[in-house]
Amino acid sequence: MKIIALEEHFTNPALNADIQKQVQKLSPHFYEAFGNNGLVGSPNPEELMDLGDIRIANMDANKIDIQCLSYSAPGAQILPPAEAISFAREANDYLADSIKAHPDRFVGFAMLPTSAPEQAAIELERAVQQLNFKGFMINGRTDDLFLDHVKFRPILEAASALDVPLFLHPSLISKGIQESYYGGFDPVLSTRFATAGFGWHAETGIHAMRMILGGIFDEYPNLQIILGHWGEMIPPFLERLDLTMSGAAKHLQRSVSEYFTNHMYVTPSGMWSLPQLKMNMDIMGADRIMYSVDYPFIKNEEARAFLENAPISDLDKEKIAYSNAKQLLKL
């Protein structure tokens, strides 16, 4: 069984100084909470930076065939337009060079300067057509706006025209929300509550729901979205969402659950949870589940064993591990 892992991250310290300053403003204890401190989700910096021998040796040891690489959040999205444009271009070129060195092991998702939507659309076209990237990743909100806002239509139009998927990924939430909803505890605990523990998954679920309720998939019927972390809290609420909102959303052509199950793929993101797998198999079906580890924030060691030992058919395992991603990313 081959495995394609779709949410695997890297960073380039040479590019990161401005981003680190912005992160510090948004979340003063972020690097303390997710530094190399031994807590789950705190990567080894050497593993996060490496796009060569260390990463490939780890993939080989754990039988991961291909990683789809993306720049670690938040990336260019928290930079002003001029800086974001140059940053995204440099980061995408850096990733493309690493993919060229290992074309049988790596593919890429583009980073976009979303604070400059017209330029982001141009960069997506360049990344797909010239750099051979397989899609793009959006990390949370830009300027406190979700992707359903009209200013981001150039990006969605480009994605639709290029027929490439969007990985909708969590990122830092606004400082006011962090303090109001998640503050009041030890700073490291509050930071983790506001991010990987709960907050950024809830916000990513809201992001996906706003795209549905905003009519994005009526406007762009071929657009496909990938959600990590077993669908960012949405799948167990689909019945409730239909019950409470589908009738009120009279501008939509279909129910909330129909949009979700026809335009969203989910991945585990290293959450090796059998109940989550079973629930998503029931709700989404094996054709709408793909695989991800979230390396190096989550380690590769359990990835293969979890899927091999899952109580599902070999055909469904193959779909989840490899063939769904092969088809969606046109590998």
Image (tube, rainbow, N blue to C red):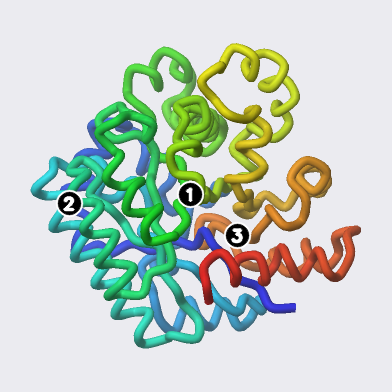
What secondary structure is found at the residue carrying circle 1? loop
- Is 281 in front, or is 247? 247
In this view, the mark in front (2 or 3): 2
Q: Residues within 10 Å of mark 3 (few under 14, many from 20)?
A: many
Distance of label 1 from label 2 (alpha carbons)? 20 Å
In the rendered structure, the answer to whether residue 310 lies left or right of residue 98 reads right
* Closest to the observer, 148 or 110: 148
Q: Are marks 3 and 1 in contact (CB under 8 Å)?
A: no
> Residue 319 is drawn in which quadrant?
bottom right
- Picture coordinates of residue 238, whole percent (x, y): 70, 28
| C-alpha distance separating marks 2 and 3 | 29 Å
**Residue 119: mark in rendering:** 2
Q: Nearer the viewer, residue 67 or 255?
A: 255
Above or below, comparing residue 274 to residue 142 in the picture: below
Quarter of the picture containing the N terminus is bottom right
Q: Residue at x 83, y 69 (%)?
A: 315
**Horizontal and vertical percent position of residue 69:** 44, 66
Amino acid at dot 2: Gln
Nearer the camera: disc 3 or disc 1: 1
The reply, left or right, for residue 275 in relation to residue 105 is right
**According to the image, label 3 marks what residue?**
292
Disc 3 marks a residue whose amino acid type is Ser
Whichever of callouts 1 and 2 sits on the residue coming sooner in the sequence is 2
Q: What residue appears at the point 29 percent right and 67 percent down from the top-left corner?
A: 127
Tell me which residue sits at (66%, 73%) in the image.
Answer: 3
The crowding category of the residue bearing disc 2, from other C-alpha atoms within 10 Å (few below 14, some 14 to 19, many at least 20), is some
**Disc 2 to disc 3: CB gap under 8 Å:** no
Query: Which tag, 3 or 1, sits closer to the chain's start?
Result: 1
Pointer 1 local density, CA inside 10 Å: few below 14, some 14–19, many at least 20: many
